[in-house]
Image (cartoon, grey):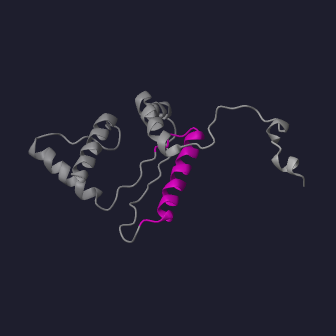
Amino acid sequence: MSDDTAKRDYRDTVFLPKTDFPMKAGLPQKEPGIAARWEAIGLYDALRTARRGREKFILHDGPPYANGDIHVGHALNHILKDMVCRTQNLLGRDAPYVPGWDCHGLPIEWKVEEQYRKEKKTKPVLTGAGRDEAAVKAFRDECRAYAQR
C-alpha cells in the first residue's frame, strides 16, 4: 500500500445524505428538556383523555423488592410492564401504567391521611367512578413531599 493510498480521504467517494444530527445523542442532557416540554403541553393527560371510556386494561404492578441491592432485573421488570401497557394503549384500550408503590408507600399514605384528618380535609376518591384526577395527583404529590422530608 502506497503512502498516497493510506493518506487519501474517502469522504468524497461515499455518497451519504447530509444531516444536522449530531454524532452523539446526548440523551442525559436532552431528556430533562424533553420531559419538561411533554409536561408543559400536557401530553400524558391528553393521551389519558383520548382513551377515556374505552375498554380498560389494568396491570396491577406490585411493590418492588425491599431487600437487597437494586440491579438490572428491577429495571427490566418495570420496562417490560411499561411495554405491555403501551402495547395495550396502541391496541386502543385504556391502559394507564402506575408503577407499584414501595413497601413504605402505605405507611406514608397513612401519615398524610392523618394530616388530612387533623386539618379536617377530605381525602380524595382514589379509585372508581368518583375519582378526581387532579385531587389524586395532589394527594400523590403530598405523599412524595412527606417521604422526601
Q: Position of residue 11 (x, y in %)?
A: 79, 39
Tell me, yes or no, if residue 45 can be seen here: no
> Chief secondary structure of the magenta span?
helix
Q: Give the mark count.
A: 0
Give the residue furthest to the top.
41
Compare residues 104 and 71 and report the one nearer the observer.
71
Compare residues 28 and 6 and report the one nearer the observer.
6
Q: For this view, does 116 lie left or right of residue 1?
A: left
Compare residues 79 and 60 and report the one nearer the observer.
79
Dividing the picture into quadrants, the one containing residue 60 is bottom left
Q: What residue span does the magenta drawing correspond to?
A: 70-96
* Residue at screen point 51% across, 50% down: 82
Q: For this view, does 60 lie left or right of residue 104?
A: right
Q: Position of residue 107 (x, y in %)?
A: 23, 58
Give the residue furthest to the right.
1
Looking at the image, residue 15 lies above or below residue 60:
above
* Residue at screen point 85% across, 38% down: 13
Q: For this view, does 55 lie left or right of residue 148?
A: right
